[in-house]
Image: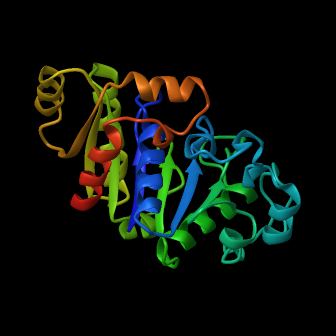
Amino acid sequence: MKLAVSGKGGVGKTTFAALLIRTLNQEGKRVLAIDADPDANLAAALGIADGDKITPISDMKDLVFERTGATPGSIGGYFSLTPKVDDLPDSISAKFENIKLMRLGGVQKGGAGCICPESSLLKALVRHVVLQRDEVVVMDMEAGIEHLGRATAKAVDKLIVVVEPGRRSIDTAGHIKQLASEIQLNHIAVVGNKIRSPKDEEYLKGHLSDFDFLGFLSYDDALIEADLEGKSPFDVDSKAKKVMKEMISRL
């Protein structure tokens, strides 16, 4: 499976992605986890020690130069649009049991729509892991799904949009669906998070009636405490783990 996870900041997207990855790992799957959201820290949510110290690939200046032939941060000039990336998941990923994690990092844009060496490398890497790797791939994406191109998007089995009961979260889900449709990524599901009551479920279903719902995760103090204490949400006792297994069976 090749899965992308997106949603508005603060809805629990990275918590969901971490629970998904750790559950797949528990079930014996080999998982390649891609942290493609510069504002998130998927490594810490997975329980990887010193996850905040993992250097994002976009900041590996020597690697970017070696693979693209151009200095990171440069605009214009010549550089490779098809850099070698097939060795990177094994050579520079952080390891945890059956999980390999790669942190992409952000790209500093000099202008709207600019193409730079870092962007070329990251897009080539995402294209490779989606089209050619045989692990389960889970990508924790920005709400803008910037790293996905048309060819890559067509090979993604499911885009999972995490939402919470709230107008802004719903609006973001609609925006993500529009962006996804523009690159022909049409396999979309929604996960409702921080659900306090059946009323919250009905609210989301009523406002997102054109989405398929994969499931709902209840508001859980244990998950909030795990985040505050820097623990993986998978390493605390919560009902979410059982619900996650049910969602994976549906996937």
How far across and down, in percent of the image, does residue 51 sit? Answer: 70, 44
Q: Is residue 27 visible?
A: yes
Residue at figure coordinates x 42%, y 60% from the top left: 24
Quarter of the image with the C terminus is bottom left
Give the image's coloring scheme: rainbow
Quarter of the image with the N terminus is bottom left
How far across and down, in percent of the image, does residue 192 sit? Answer: 26, 35
Left or right side of 29 for 99: right
Left or right side of 13 for 213: left
Q: Is residue 143 visible?
A: no
Q: Is residue 90 above or below residue 140?
A: below
Q: Which is more toward the observer, 193 or 237?
A: 237
Q: Quadrant of residue 29?
A: bottom left
Residue at figure coordinates x 30%, y 53% from the top left: 245
How far across and down, in percent of the image, does residue 126 sit? Answer: 56, 64
Q: Quadrant of residue 183?
A: bottom left
How far across and down, in percent of the image, does residue 8 sit? Answer: 42, 31
Residue at figure coordinates x 78%, y 51% from the top left: 75
Q: Is residue 51 above or below residue 171?
A: below
Left or right side of 107 for 132: left
Q: Which is more toward the observer, 130 or 251?
A: 251
